[in-house]
Image (tube, rainbow, N blue to C red):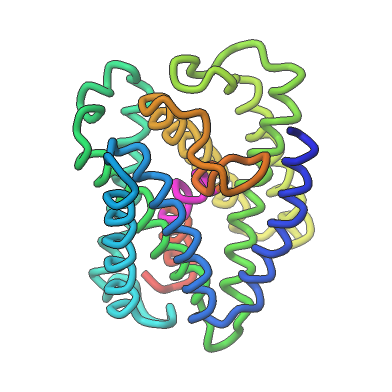
Amino acid sequence: MFKQRVITALILAPLALMAVFYLPLAGFAVFISAAFLLGAWEWSGFCGLPDKASRGGYVGLTAIVLALLYWQLPQQASWPLENNILLSSLLMAGVGWWLLAIVLVLTYPRSQRLWVNSDWGKALMGWLTLIPAWAAVLFIRSTDYAASSFTGAWLIFALLALVWAADIGGYIVGKPFGKHKLLPKVSPGKTVEGMLGGLALVALVVTVVAMLQDWPAQTPVWYIAALLLTVLSVFGDLTESMFKRAAGKKDSGAFLPGHGGILDRIDSLTATAPLFAIIVALYSGFY
């Protein structure tokens, strides 16, 4: 399993980065939309939908929403974000949902009585997970695109590096040294030591970047943002685990050998992207 997981990661990571850096905006929108629609298919499995036709309907409705939003959103982030009520609302809805998700995770299993028997409630939670994150990723990729097609790509790479560092740090520390369960009723494999390992590796990455940049004045803000985003990435994973546990599933799907489903790989990205997009907007003068 571990060997298969490594092989899949070694194939997928370069492909994902090539898409981020070298696809034009329209091509990148198609690429990221395909990934999120696969995520919608997997989420439909949490919703108690009775058959493939119903699940396909959920994916189809999600695709229509994404298409309508893409038609309404500007192609490039070269304008004040506050002037775009639609995108601002999507990002704030995403951040608001993840604050609520943290509460639901921390109070699980008591909290499940609020949503576990509501198929439409779980469907709505799926849209709040996927759609704001989709919009955030497109916004980040298009940042300052007219001046340089790589600015947004490097920003997405920074977000991915943070998520990967949190995941890798959690694994290399939590696997051999994890003794104290973080939230065993949600995810028995998560440990306090693993989360601290992820935070430590993220802090190390930020420190290295700050050193290479000759310790700019924004360094304290980088540390605070990295801390918040790392915690969110952990809760992205835990939130998906909560829905999988309620649905009686081990993995969200089987698209990725050794990794489970698409949601198992993008859960942390869906949690962090809306807040990261707002941070980018604030520090790029687009808010």
Question: Which quarter of the figure has residue 37?
Answer: bottom left
Left or right of residue 23: residue 136: left
Q: Is residue 225 visible?
A: no
Front residue of 155 and 130: 130
Residue 267 in the magenta stretch? The answer is yes
Left or right of residue 2: residue 148: left
Secondary structure predominantly adopted by residues drawn in magenta: helix
Residue 186 x/y as whole percent: 45, 21
Quadrant in the picture for the C terminus: bottom left
As displayed, is residue 210 above or below residue 164? below
Residue 282 x/y as whole percent: 43, 64
As displayed, is residue 189 above or below residue 89? above
Q: Is residue 221 visible?
A: yes
Residue 117 x/y as whole percent: 21, 28
Residue in the image at 73% along x and 33% along y: 1
Front residue of 42 and 201: 42
Residue in the image at 72% along x and 47% along y: 205
Question: Which quarter of the figure has residue 151?
Answer: bottom right
Residue 161 x/y as whole percent: 66, 52
- Count of all numbered marks drawn on residues in the image: 0
Front residue of 51 and 283: 51
Residue 79 in the magenta stretch? The answer is no
Left or right of residue 214: residue 59: left
As displayed, is residue 46 above or below residue 28? above
Residue in the image at 22% along x and 37% along y: 119
Q: Residue furthest top?
A: 179
Question: Which quarter of the figure has residue 114?
Answer: top left
Q: Write the start and end of the magenta stretch as one range.
A: 266-274
Front residue of 47 and 236: 47
